[in-house]
Image (tube, rainbow, N blue to C red):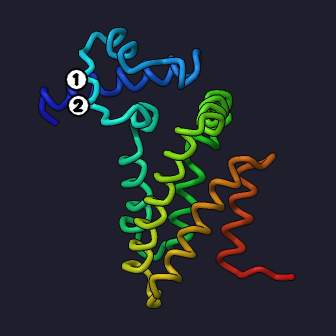
């Protein structure tokens, strides 16, 4: 990465961190983009060059997260199953880091209690589902129809999402992934 790109990345991160902190302190709807731009010492048009919508200020890492999700499937080591690679990927995810749990919980509370952010998060999740379904179709040994790949992608992501709310997130995630591997037994 060149110096110019590095400077842009630092500025983008600074703006996003500032905005997220303000949203969590004051409430998403109480903070304006003009206020964020002023405090970040950039113009409003510059702010919108980095972040096309107010929601993207909060979800500044969505593209990188999607890329890491897909890479967990496509770049897995020889002999590692797709489910094992995804389980490892999700297990190392920040939401399961007890050190950052309080911070993650506060962020999630802000997202789920703000209709605009909650709706935007759902759109991101649906995009991740579609991308994961494509990766599953491309990487699986047994041919998957589109509906099958989409259903599997949905359940994989839903298992991660639901596990975050469990008393023991990692154990819950492992249990749900074992169900996918071995099937549900009554």
The image shows residue 48 at horizontal and vertical percentages of 27, 29
Which element carries disc 1, helix, strand or loop? helix
Q: Residue at x 27, y 31 (%)?
A: 50
In the depicted view, which residue is nearer to us: 29 or 79? 29
In the picture shown, does residue 50 fall above or below 75?
above
In the rendering, at what x and y percent does residue 53 appear? 36, 35
Q: Left or right: 126 with respect to 78? A: right
Please determine whether, in this image, residue 49 is positioned above or below residue 85: above
Dividing the picture into quadrants, the one containing residue 100 is top right
Mark identifier at residue 46:
1
Answer whether labels 2 and 1 touch (C-beta < 8 Å): yes
Q: Is residue 138 above or below residue 113?
A: below
Estimate the x, y position of residue 168 in percent, counting from the top left: 78, 48
Secondary structure, mark 2, is helix
Q: Residue at x 47, y 90 (%)?
A: 142
Q: Residue at the location (27% across, 19% down)?
A: 44
When asked about the image quadrant of residue 66, the answer is: bottom left
Report the Cα–Cα distance between label 2 and label 1: 5 Å
Q: How many discs appear?
A: 2
User: Residue at label 2?
Assistant: 49
The quarter of the image holding the N terminus is top left
Question: Residue furthest toward the bottom?
Answer: 143
Q: Residue furthest right?
A: 186
């Amino acid at each position: 990465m060149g110096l110019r790109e590095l400077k842009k990345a630092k500025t983008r991160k600074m703006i996003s961190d500032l905005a997220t902190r303000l949203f969590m302190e004051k409430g998403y709807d109480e903070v304006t983009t003009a206020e964020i731009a002023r405090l970040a010492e950039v113009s409003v048009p510059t702010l919108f060059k980095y972040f096309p919508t107010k929601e993207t200020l909060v979800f500044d890492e969505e593209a990188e997260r999607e890329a890491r999700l897909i890479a967990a499937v496509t770049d897995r080591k020889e002999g590692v199953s797709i489910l094992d690679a995804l389980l490892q990927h999700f297990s190392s995810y920040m939401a399961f880091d007890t050190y950052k749990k309080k911070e993650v919980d506060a962020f999630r509370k802000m997202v789920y209690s703000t209709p605009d952010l909650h709706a935007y998060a759902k759109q991101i999740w649906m995009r991740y589902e579609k991308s994961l379904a494509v990766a599953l179709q491309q990487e699986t040994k047994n041919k998957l129809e589109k509906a099958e790949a989409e259903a599997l992608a949905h359940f994989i992501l839903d298992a991660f999402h639901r596990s975050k709310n469990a008393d023991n997130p990692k154990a819950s995630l492992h249990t749900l992934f074992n169900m996918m591997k071995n099937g549900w037994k009554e």
